[in-house]
Image: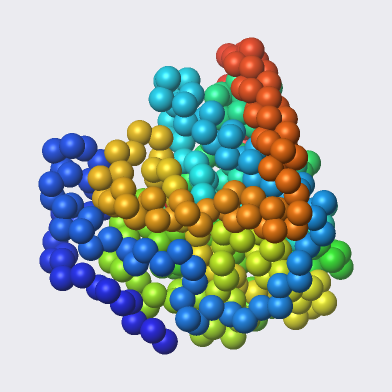
Amino acid sequence: MKPVENEPNVEISGKSAAAPNSEAEAETVESAVSASISTEVLPSDSATELDVPALPTEMLLEMYRKALAIRLMERALLAAAEEGQIGGAMHTAIGHEANAVGAANALRKGDYVTCTYRGHHHGLAWGMDPGRAIAEVMGRSDGFAKGKGGSMHFVSPENGMMGANGIVAAQVPHAAGLALASHLRGEDTVAITFFGDGALFQGVMHETFNMAAKWKLPLIFYCENNRYSEMTPIWRTSSIEDIFLFPRAYGMETMQIDGNDVEVVHAAVSKAAERARCGAGPTFIEGITYRLAGHMAGDLETYRPAEEVEKQEAYEPLTVLRQKLTARGVDEASIAVIDEEVDEMIEDAVDFAEESPWPDAAETYRDVYV
Ligand SMILES: Cc1ncc(C[n+]2csc(CCOP(=O)(O)OP(=O)(O)O)c2C)c(N)n1
Ligand SMILES: [Mg+2]
């Protein structure tokens, strides 16, 4: 087990790097910024050796289209939030796209997903329509939950998207419930649950690890390790760097992979799904990734240096995908055509959402359990 490296000589006080979101507080986190996360963009030496078959070019093109749609939708949502069009907190998954797209393509229609408040990418990867998705985040009546769920409660059961959750780790036992239901009904449906590195230290994670491993539930635990919990770098919260080693204590198969490469994610999730469907139980996957935008709309990002973000931008999911496509003979012009089509599709989706009416006041008490 590897201890956290590069642990900087920063005194941990009550006022840590966890609350640096105002100019006035920026100074207090200066020391933390100068000793931010390791800027490695790839998994550590402990990364799992995985057989990664090359996916057909047609599939890669579809994945590129989807990942780009997610990216452009997220950028549009950030802009809308800045214009004051979105109520409440809004977190984007800019930089995390490959985790969602690679996983969704490795699973079947009908397989379930649950995720964090940073889950728009999972929604789109699971087939949610961008126009209705944006409408939901904007609180409009054409949204998937009639505008009543918003970003933090992104949900679309008809697409297998069983819910985002604003409570860190709460979506994880929900997925175990879905996996248990599938098991009890004798179905071969798999559930996958996405969570962040920060969720790993919630008690409910460990209760779920134990139960899922003991009952051999058809469940995939997928940690999108972006190495920050809100504004706190991972070295402040974890005693070891390779967090995929934690669930091994529960007798679970684990993998640490490159979460910025759709083919690697696809290979890992395919393997985990195969195990789940044949009754071999859950698998824990740690996808190393990076959040290129702030933790949420309005984040001043005073807790990390710009150079760190720049370094990660050189190895982000869309760049990796474009390089793969070029290496397989897809020319720049064909990629530019896709870029234009997806751009237009997201512009239309934004227009649709903006034109969608506000929910009727009478909706307030509908769909509410008493
Ligand atoms: C139970 C609970 N505690 C604290 C919070 C406040 N909070 C919101 S996001 C977050 C950080 C989570 O980090 P991570 O799991 O790494 O996910 P990321 O945001 O990096 O995707 C925290 C602590 C919360 N929402 N729920
Ligand atoms: Mg995180």
- Which image quarter holds the C terminus? top right
Q: Nearer the viewer, residue 22 or 59?
A: 59
- Which image quarter holds the N terminus? bottom left
Q: Nearer the viewer, residue 181 or 278?
A: 278
Q: Nearer the viewer, residue 365 or 175?
A: 175
Q: Could you tell me how many numbered marks the image carries?
A: 0
Residue 44, position as x, y percentages in the image: 46, 76
Residue 64, position as x, y percentages in the image: 69, 47
Position of residue 348 in the picture relative to residue 43 (left or right): right
Q: Residue at x 50, y 82 (%)?
A: 46
Q: Nearer the viewer, residue 13 or 304?
A: 304
State how the image is colored: rainbow
Residue 347, position as x, y percentages in the image: 64, 23
Q: Is residue 204 above or below residue 85?
A: below
Q: Is residue 232 above or below residue 220?
A: above
User: Visible in this render: residue 178?
Assistant: no
Q: Residue at x 28, y 51 (%)?
A: 305
Q: Is residue 357 above or below residue 76?
A: above
Position of residue 98 in the picture relative to residue 165 (left or right): right
Q: Residue at x 54, y 83 (%)?
A: 248
Position of residue 90 in the picture relative to residue 284 (left or right): left
Residue 213, position as x, y percentages in the image: 64, 78
Position of residue 45 in the picture relative to residue 194 (left or right): left
Q: Residue at x 51, y 49 (%)?
A: 95
